[in-house]
Image (cartoon, rainbow, N blue to C red):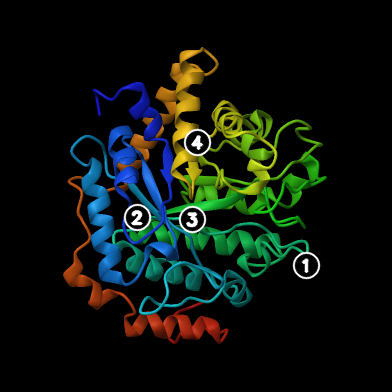
Amino acid sequence: MKSAGLKQKIGQTFIIGFDGKSPSADVQKFISDNCIGGVILFDRNVSDPIQLADMNNSLQNLILKSAPPMFISIDMEGGRVARLKSPFTVWPSMQTLGKIDSATLGFKFAETMGKELLSVGINMNFSPCVDIFTNPNNKVIGDRSFGSDAEVVSKMSSSVVRGFVKAGVIPCIKHFPGHGDTLIDSHDDLPVVEHDLARLEEVEFVPFKKAFRARAEFCMTAHIKLPKIDPEWPATMSHKILNDILRKHLGYRYLIITDDMEMKAITKNYPVEVAATQAVMAGCNVLLYCHTLEVQERALEAILKAVVDGKISESVIDSNYNAVLKIKKNNLSDPFKMADVSQIPKIVGHPEHLSLAKCIAEGKIPPGLTS
C-alpha cells in the first residue's frame, strides 16, 4: 500500500460489523473505497460453515488487489459468548475451563477452536477474556472469566493466547485495564471503578502482563471510568491509561483496539466524532464499530478532519497504519490463502474436537493430556 492516501491509512485502522449473510453494496463500497482493515462477524452473519467461508473469501477479494488481507474477526470465547453454533464445536465457558486449571488443556482448547475458525477464513478472535472475576455481582463478565484468582486467570490466559497463536489465529485479550469488578454493563452505560494504580498492579494487571509475554498482539480496552487514574476520560479514551500506563509503565508494544465504539457507555456520553478522535489521541491504534455504516462513516471522516485541522498529527496515523501492516505481515500468510471450502467438513465439528469440548464441560482432562 505504498500509494495509500490518508483516508485509506485511516481505513486500515478500522474493524467494522454489518448486518446480513453478506455485506450490502454500500458496505462493500465503504470497505473497498477506504481499504478498511477488517470486519467483525456475529451470528447474524452466519448460516452455515460453507456460506461463512464463501463470504469471508468474498470480503478478502474486496481489497486484496490494493491492500493487505483483512482481519476477519469474531467473538468466540465459549459458553454464552459464542457466535458459531453447531455444526461448529460448541465450547464450554472460560469459567468451566478455569476450574480445571490446566495450562495444557487451555492451550489445546484454543488451538482446536482456532483450527475451526481458520478453516472458514476467520483469522482473529476477540478472546481470551483475561478479566478477574472479583465481583460476584458482575453479570457482564461472570462466567466469561477464568475465575477470581489472579494466578489461575494468568496461567489460563497465557495458555489460551499461545494456543490461538499456534493455530494461526490472532488472539485479542480484553478488557484493559480490567472489567472484573464492575456492576454496570458497558453495553448499557459507563461503569465507574474506584481502583487506584496500586490495586490495579496487585490484581487486574497480573494476567495482562502474563498474556503480553505469551505474544498477545491485540489488547482491547474497557469502556470503564477510573476517576482515581483519569477523572476526565474512560479507559478507551484516556491517554493516561493507554499511553502512560499500558505503553510506558507496562511496556506493551503491540496493537491497542477499542471495545465496540457503538456501546452505550460511549454513545450515551460522547458524540461519535468526539469519541473517535479522542480514542486515537489517547493511543488506540484500531477502532472497532460493530453495527452501523453511518456511524462508521462519521467516525472515519471525523478522524480525517482532525488530521486536516491539525488536531491529530499525521505521524500518529502513519504510526497506527504501519503497526497494523506489521501485525498483518507477521500473521497473515503471504501469498494470502483463502479458506478452502473442500476442507471444512474434515475440520469443523471433528469428532476429536467434540470429545475435547465434552471433557471440558464435564470438568475433565482428556486421556493422554497432562495437566
| Distance (Cα) linking label 1 and label 4 | 32 Å
Q: Secondary structure at mark 1?
A: loop
Badge 2 marks a residue whose secondary structure is: loop
Q: Residue at x 47, y 38 (%)?
A: 286
Q: Are marks 1 and 4 in contact (CB under 8 Å)?
A: no
Which residue bears the numbered disc 3?
A: 126
Amino acid type, callout 4: Arg
- Determine whether, in the image, residue 228 is placed left or right of residue 92: right
Q: Is residue 353 above or below residue 18?
A: below
Instruction: Choose the circle earlier in sequence order: 1 or 4.
Output: 1
- Front-most of 26 and 65? 26
How packed mark 4 is, by other alpha carbons closer than 10 Å (few <14, some 14-19, many 20 or more), is some
Labelled disc at residue 279: none
> Quadrant of the rendered structure where residue 143 is?
bottom right
Mark closest to the chain's N terminus, 2 or 4: 2
> What is the CA distance from the residue labelled 1 to the residue labelled 3?
23 Å
Q: Quadrant of the N terminus?
A: top left
